[in-house]
Image (cartoon, rainbow, N blue to C red):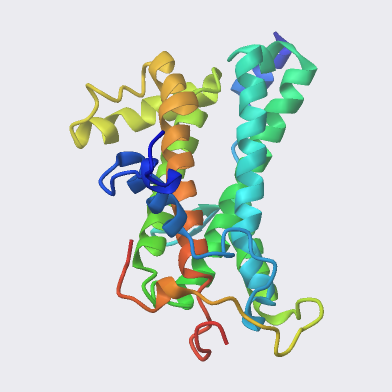
C-alpha cells in the first residue's frame, strides 16, 4: 500500500520554461548528451588510418538504377 | 540412349520463376559487397559507427522482447528477473533511438541521398517512423498507471486523425499485439531493406570526397 501511494504521488520531474517553451530537465540533458556525442563523433580520430586502401567496385552506382 | 548432351537436356527456360528469383537475389548486392572486409578511407570516422550501433541495439531490443513475451505482460511486475529483462528492453530502446537519431543527423548533414541512394534514405526515414510507433505501443503495454495516462492522453489525437476505430489506444490487448507482432515485423522488414540498399550502393561519402575514394 505504501509502495502504491509512492507511485501515485511520485513528484513530477523538474520542468524548465522559457515563455511558451517548456521541457523536462531529464529530456533536455539527454538531448544535450546526444548533441555532444554527435560533435565528439565528428572530431575524435577513429583508430588507425589505412591511406590508399583499395576499395571494392560497385557496379550498381554506375547505372541509374535506384532500386 | 539419347544423343543429346546432358547440359542441353537439363536446360531451364529463361522465363522460369526460379531462374528469375535466383538472378534477382544474385544481382541484389554487387559481388563481394554483402559482407565486405574493406571500406573506403572516409569510413574511418566515428560518425559511420552509429548505423551499426543502431542495429546492435535493435538486436538487444528484439531479444529481450522475445524473453518478455515468454514471461507474459505482467511478468515484470511480479519477478525481479522479469523486471531486469524489462529494464534491459527499456534501456536498449533508449540507446536504439539515441544511436538512430545521431545516425540520422550524420546522414542528413552528409546529404546521404546522393549517388542513387534515395531509397536508402527513404527506407531509413520510414524505419524511424515505424520505430516511433513501435515504441509508442510499447509504452501503452506497460500495464501500469503510466500506460493508462499515456493512452488517455493519446486517444484524442488518434481519434482526430480518424483511425481510432482501427487503432484503439484504450485497448491494451490490441496495443500489445501491435507492439509484439505487426510493428516489429514492419520495422524488421524495412531494416533489412535499408541494410541491403546500403550494401548495394555502399556507404555515402562525405560531401568533399568522391564515391569510393
Q: Is residue A25 visible?
A: no
Residue B185, image x, y percentages: 45, 33
Please tell me which residue lies in front, B106 or B154. B106
Q: Residue furthest top?
A: A1
Residue B142, image x, y percentages: 55, 23
Position above or below: B14 against A29: above
Q: Quadrant of the image for the C terminus of chain B?
A: bottom right
Position above or below: B174 against B20: above
Query: Residue sitting at 36 percent across and 19 percent down?
Result: B170
Residue B68, image x, y percentages: 64, 21
Q: Quadrant of the image for the N terminus of chain B?
A: top left
Query: Residue sitting at 28 percent across and 49 percent down?
Result: B14
Position above or below: B62 against B101: above
In this picture, residue B60 sits left or right of residue B24 = right
Q: Is residue B185 visible?
A: yes
In this picture, residue B49 sits left or right of residue B7 = right
Residue A45, image x, y percentages: 76, 81
Query: Residue sitting at 65 percent across and 46 percent down?
Result: B57
Query: Residue sitting at 62 percent across and 69 percent down?
Result: B48
Q: Residue furthest left?
A: B162
Please tell me which residue lies in front, B59 or A11. B59
Place residue B86 in its image quadrant: top right
Place residue B92 in its image quadrant: top right
Amino acid at each position: 500500500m505504501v509502495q502504491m501511494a509512492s507511485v501515485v504521488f511520485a513528484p513530477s520531474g523538474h520542468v524548465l520554461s522559457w515563455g511558451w517553451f517548456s521541457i523536462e530537465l531529464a529530456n533536455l540533458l539527454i538531448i544535450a548528451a546526444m548533441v555532444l556525442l554527435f560533435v565528439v563523433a565528428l572530431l575524435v580520430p577513429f583508430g588507425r588510418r589505412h591511406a590508399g586502401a583499395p576499395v571494392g567496385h560497385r557496379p550498381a552506382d554506375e547505372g541509374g538504377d535506384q532500386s | 540412349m539419347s544423343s543429346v548432351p546432358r547440359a542441353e537436356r537439363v536446360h531451364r527456360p529463361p522465363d522460369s520463376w526460379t531462374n528469375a528469383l535466383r538472378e534477382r537475389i544474385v544481382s541484389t548486392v554487387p559481388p563481394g559487397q554483402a559482407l565486405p572486409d574493406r571500406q573506403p578511407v572516409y569510413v574511418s570516422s566515428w560518425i559511420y559507427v552509429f548505423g551499426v550501433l543502431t542495429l546492435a541495439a535493435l538486436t538487444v531490443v528484439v531479444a529481450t522482447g522475445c524473453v518478455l513475451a515468454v514471461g507474459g505482460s505482467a511478468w515484470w511486475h511480479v519477478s525481479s528477473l522479469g523486471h531486469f529483462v524489462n529494464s534491459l528492453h527499456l534501456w536498449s530502446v533508449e540507446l536504439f533511438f539515441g544511436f538512430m537519431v545521431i545516425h540520422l543527423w550524420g546522414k542528413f548533414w552528409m546529404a546521404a541521398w546522393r549517388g542513387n541512394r534515395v531509397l536508402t534514405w527513404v527506407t531509413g526515414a520510414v524505419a524511424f517512423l515505424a520505430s516511433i510507433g513501435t515504441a509508442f505501443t510499447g509504452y501503452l503495454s506497460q500495464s501500469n498507471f503510466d500506460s493508462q495516462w499515456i493512452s488517455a492522453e493519446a486517444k484524442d489525437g488518434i481519434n482526430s486523425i480518424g483511425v481510432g476505430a482501427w487503432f484503439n489506444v484504450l485497448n491494451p490487448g490490441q496495443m500489445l499485439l501491435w507492439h509484439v507482432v505487426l510493428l516489429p515485423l514492419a520495422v524488421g522488414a524495412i531494416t533489412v531493406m535499408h541494410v541491403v540498399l546500403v550494401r548495394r550502393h555502399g556507404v555515402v561519402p562525405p560531401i568533399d570526397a568522391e564515391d569510393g575514394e
